[in-house]
Image: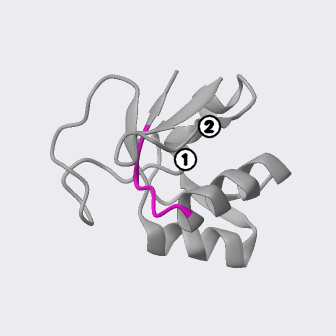
Amino acid sequence: MQILAVDKPALPPFEMPARFRLEIVYFMTCPGERGAPAKLGENEYWIDHDEARQWLDDLVVCVVSPLDAAAKAEIPLTEEHEAWLQWLLANDVKHVRVV
C-alpha cells in the first residue's frame, strides 16, 4: 500500500505493508487536536511531528485501550514504522492519505 503526502503532493508516495492500514490509527492525531484539521477526508490522517519525534526517540508508540482508558500498552516500532516516521519528519509531512 502507499502513503500519499496530502500536504506535499509532488512527493513520491511511501510504500508500507498492507497491515499498516490497521496500524496507522496508533499514530494519528485526533481531528481538531494539536493542529489537526477538524475534518479529514476518507482514509486521511494527521500525524503530529512532536509525537513522531518522541516515538522515534523511544522506539515505541503508546496505545490506550478503547475499552479502558487506564489500560495502556507500548508497541515497539518496526523497521517500517521507523522509516515511515523518518520520511514524515524529513519531508515535513503531517497530512497523509492511505491508498
58 in the magenta segment: no
94 in the magenta segment: yes
Image location of residue 64, percent across then percent down:
52, 53
> Image height check: is 69 above or below 67?
below
Element at label 1: helix
* Residue 51 in view in this figure: yes
Residue 26, which numbered label? 1
At horizontal 65% and vertical 23% (from top left) the residue drawn is: 1
Magenta part mainly helix, strand or loop? loop
Disc 2 target residue: 23
At horizontal 52% and vertical 61% (from top left) the residue drawn is: 91
> Image height check: is 14 above or below 76?
above
At horizontal 71% and vertical 34% (from top left) the residue drawn is: 16
Q: Does the residue at mark 1 contact the one at mark 2 (Cβ under 8 Å)?
A: yes
Type of amino acid under label 1: Tyr
Mark 2 nearby-residue class (10 Å; few <14, some 14–19, many ≥20) = few
Q: In which quarter of the image is residue 45?
A: top left
Q: Give the range drawn in magenta.
A: 91-96
Q: Quadrant of residue 41?
A: top left
At horizontal 58% and vertical 35% (from top left) the residue drawn is: 13
Residue 36, which numbered label? none
Tell me: 17 left or right of 95: right
Element at label 2: helix
* Residue 72 in view in this figure: no
Q: Which of 27 and 8 is in front in this view?
A: 8
Q: How many labels does the image show?
A: 2
Image location of residue 21, percent across then percent down:
59, 27
Type of amino acid under label 2: Glu
